[in-house]
Image (tube, rainbow, N blue to C red):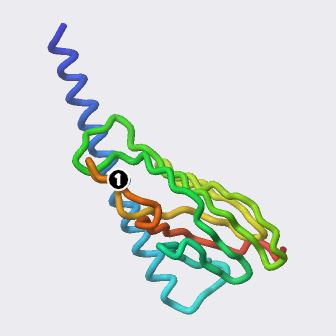
């Protein structure tokens, strides 16, 4: 009875390790590619990659983005987890008419797209990655997201 349980644990731990490693590698590669694209002349169809750091408020075209909160439940470095976790970034987005809406950007294995005032927003990454025994403050986090104009609104 113990032998099948032992084999099952080994198989599951291998799956968890491999999938989280692949997901992390893909994220780093995608972010690097997007940052390289953003350094070339902007093409509205491709969108723009922006970062929100300690300033917490940035302007992009006719939008103002304010970082409200970051919920980071990703598996911390130095810890073995059975769930990879997720990121939830809450932004307050306002347009040139001072209309405001709250937008939640969620990233599990894949990011979900949020729409605001004719733009699509996609969460690419939040750094630094959580570490065992270390609390990361909001002002220390850097959010990377992609913004694409979707309509003339």
Residue at 45% over, 50% down: 72
Quarter of the view holding residue 44: bottom right
Quarter of the view holding residue 9: top left
> Is residue 66 toward the left or the right of residue 83 in the image?
right
Q: 37 or 101: nearer the eye?
A: 101
Q: Residue furthest bottom?
A: 41
Q: Position of residue 142 (x, y in %)?
A: 45, 68
The image shows a total of numbered marks equal to 1
Q: Which residue is mark 1?
A: 135
Quarter in which the N terminus is drawn: top left
Q: Residue furthest top?
A: 1
Q: 85 or 135: nearer the eye?
A: 135
Residue at 49% over, 52% down: 87
Q: 116 or 59: nearer the eye?
A: 59
Quarter of the view holding residue 11: top left
Q: Position of residue 117 (x, y in %)?
A: 78, 69
């Amino acid at each position: 009875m113990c032998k099948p349980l032992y084999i099952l644990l080994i198989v599951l731990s291998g799956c968890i390790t491999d999938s989280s490693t692949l997901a992390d590698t893909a994220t780093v590669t995608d972010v690097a590619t997007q940052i390289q694209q953003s350094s070339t002349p902007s093409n509205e169809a491709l969108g723009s990659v922006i970062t929100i750091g300690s300033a917490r408020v940035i302007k992009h075209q006719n939008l103002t983005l304010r970082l409200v909160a970051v919920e980071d439940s990703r598996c911390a470095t130095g810890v073995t987890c059975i769930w990879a976790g997720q990121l939830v970034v809450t932004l307050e987005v306002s347009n040139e008419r001072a209309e405001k809406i709250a937008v939640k950007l969620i990233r599990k294995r894949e990011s979900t797209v949020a729409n605001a005032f004719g733009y699509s927003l996609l969460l690419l990454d939040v750094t630094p990655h959580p570490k065992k025994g270390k609390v990361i403050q909001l002002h220390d986090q850097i959010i990377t997201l992609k913004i694409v104009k979707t309509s003339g609104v």
